[in-house]
Amino acid sequence: MAQGTWNFVVRRAAEHDVDAIAQITLEAFQKVLPYLRPLAASDPDGFLASSASRSHEVIRGEKGPDVQWLVAVEQETQEVAAIAKWDRIANLCATDFVPATSSAFGGPPQVDFYNHQELVHRRIMGDRPHYWLHILATRPSFQRTGAASALLRNLTETADTEQLLLYLEAAPGSLPVYQKFGWTAMESLSMPTIAGLPDASEVVMLRQPYGGRPVGH
């Protein structure tokens, strides 16, 4: 298909999408998996199976109605080009923080990182209702085709309609994409230190709905 002629349809994921979701997750996050899921490299099949199982739970509604997978599907081929997982949170601090004691395909450094990530999320959002974009990933063959932007338009339009903030943690290289859609960088989180690899981080970002209060209020 010629450049500039891509057409994507955004829809809620169905159970037949779980293998594509797992594969895109594995392919798109190759750079961060050594930091956050280091054991995935030695067991990619196990990682794919675990990811598919968790996606099944979300799609079946076992994680509640507020957690959703969305997919951007190329209209002509019906191939899943990009994926997004998000959660509508009424009040993150309605329950006490319970530290995690284990991390899938990780060890103590990853447990510590995810606990810190959760505490930062709670500190920034407090009791404010918001959407949390857990994952946004594009199949490598669909990079720079507008697939991720199709998902972001859908997500931001929904948040604007409901007048809800949108929270996420982003790779530094993806900041321009999110800033284009109205996100503001809040602070940086250092990822676990891994021997032989450069230091890495992610950036907490927040987006106010159009017509809403300024970010940080």
Image (spheres, grey):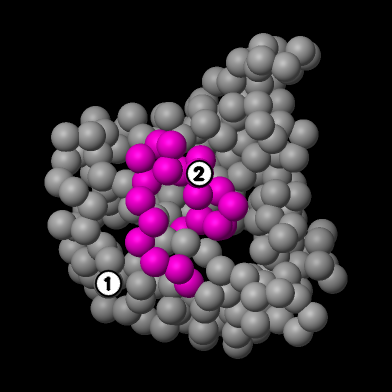
| The quarter of the displayed image where residue 94 is located | bottom left
Task: Confirm whether residue 182 shows in the render.
Answer: yes
Instruction: Please state if 51 lies on the left or on the right of 160 as rendered.
Output: right
Q: Residue at x 76, y 13 (%)?
A: 2
Which of the image's four quarters has the N terminus? top right
- Bounds of the magenta span? 169-189
Q: Position of residue 145 (x, y in %)?
A: 65, 26
Q: Residue at x 81, y 67 (%)?
A: 41
Please report whichever mark, 1 or 2, sits nearer to the chain's N-terminal start: 1
Cα distance between the residues tagged 1 and 2: 25 Å
Q: Which element type, helix, strand or loop, lies under badge 2?
A: helix
Q: Could you say whether the residue bearing mark 1 is in a helix, strand or loop?
A: helix
Q: Amino acid at mark 2?
A: Pro
Residue 171 belongs to magenta span: yes
Residue 27 percent coordinates (x, y): 75, 50
Q: Quadrant of the C terminus?
A: bottom left
**Residue 108, percent across and down?**
60, 87
User: Horizontal placement of 23 versus 62: left or right?
Assistant: right
Instruction: Give the residue number, with chain letter if any, for mark 1.
Output: 123
Q: Is residue 151 above or below residue 57?
A: above
Q: Is residue 87 magenta?
A: no
Residue 176's label in the rendered image is 2
Instruction: Please report the residue visible at 43 percent of the width from the left and 37 percent of the height from the top.
Output: 180
Question: Compared to 45, does 166 lie above or below?
Answer: above
Q: Residues within 10 Å of mark 2 (few under 14, many from 20)?
A: few
